[in-house]
Image (cartoon, rainbow, N blue to C red):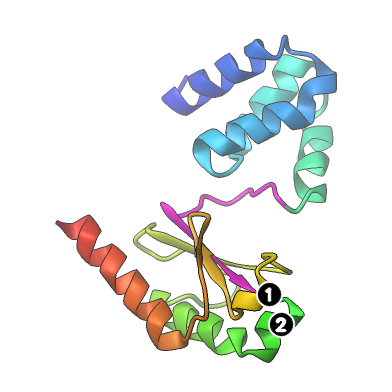
């Protein structure tokens, strides 16, 4: 058993392997690894005595569960009305180009960044807004967003 599955097994056991705790178990495993791997979903099903299809259907029903590995840093660009009107789309587009993302790909090839959109970050007065690892960055521009990412790359390289 891999380290990931060993830890996932410990998480499941901590909830008493109870089917009623399925969502809580999935949340805990995702908070540990930033996503739910196919192996983790299978392990959950086995330990809870339910079908893999049932676990998978829950994982795909709720938008906050991810079945794809995410980068070390999660970027969320607000697409709410206030941010959209104040030009959040060019920020998203600039970051997407900078990270070399195409199609449905959300994570940079180096695994450093994952780019997502959100309906609203609740900071409309600071629009356009984005977060990096939950930290709010207000009144953004494409240039300012890319400067932040460059700074993060530089700091991580040191």
Q: In the rendering, at what x and y percent does residue 122 appear?
A: 70, 65
Mark 1 or mark 2: whose residue is earlier in sequence: 2
At 38% from the left and 64% from the top, the residue drawn is 109
Which image quadrant is residue 26 in? top right
In this orientation, which residue lies closer to the viewer: 107 or 126? Answer: 126
Residue 42 magenta: no
Q: Is residue 9 above or below residue 124?
A: above
Q: Residue furthest front?
A: 125
Which image quadrant is residue 104 in? bottom right
- Magenta range is 64-78
In the picture provided, is 61 more to the left or to the right than 110?
Answer: right
Task: Write down the residue under mark 1.
Answer: 124
In this orientation, which residue lies closer to the viewer: 64 or 147? Answer: 147
At 27% from the left and 69% from the top, the residue drawn is 151
Q: Secondary structure at mark 2?
A: helix
State the CA–CA distance, disc 1 to disc 2. Answer: 6 Å
In the picture provided, is 15 more to the left or to the right than 158?
Answer: right
At 48% from the left and 55% from the top, the residue drawn is 133
Prevailing SS of the magenta stretch: loop
Q: 10 Å neighbourhood of mark 1: few (<14), some, or many (≥20)?
A: some
Q: In the rendering, at what x and y percent does residue 37 appear?
A: 58, 39
Task: Write down the residue under mark 2.
Answer: 82
Q: Is residue 78 above or below residue 45?
A: below
Quarter of the figure that contains the C terminus = bottom left
Q: Are marks 1 and 2 in contact (CB under 8 Å)?
A: yes
């Amino acid at each position: 058993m891999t380290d990931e599955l060993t830890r996932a097994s410990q998480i499941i056991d901590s909830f008493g392997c109870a089917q009623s705790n399925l969502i809580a178990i999935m949340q805990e495993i995702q908070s540990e690894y930033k996503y739910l791997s196919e192996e983790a979903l299978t392990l959950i099903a086995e330990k809870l005595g339910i079908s893999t299809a049932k676990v998978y259907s829950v994982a795909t029903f709720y938008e906050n569960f991810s079945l794809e590995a995410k980068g070390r840093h999660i970027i969320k660009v607000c697409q709410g009305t206030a941010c959209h009107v104040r030009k959040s789309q060019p920020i998203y587009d600039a970051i997407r180009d900078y990270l070399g993302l195409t199609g449905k790909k959300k994570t940079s090839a180096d695994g450093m960044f994952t780019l997502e959109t959100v309906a609203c970050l609740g900071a409309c007065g600071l629009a356009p807004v984005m977060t990096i690892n939950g930290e709010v960055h207000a009144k953004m521009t494409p240039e300012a967003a890319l400067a932040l990412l460059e700074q993060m790359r530089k700091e991580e390289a040191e």
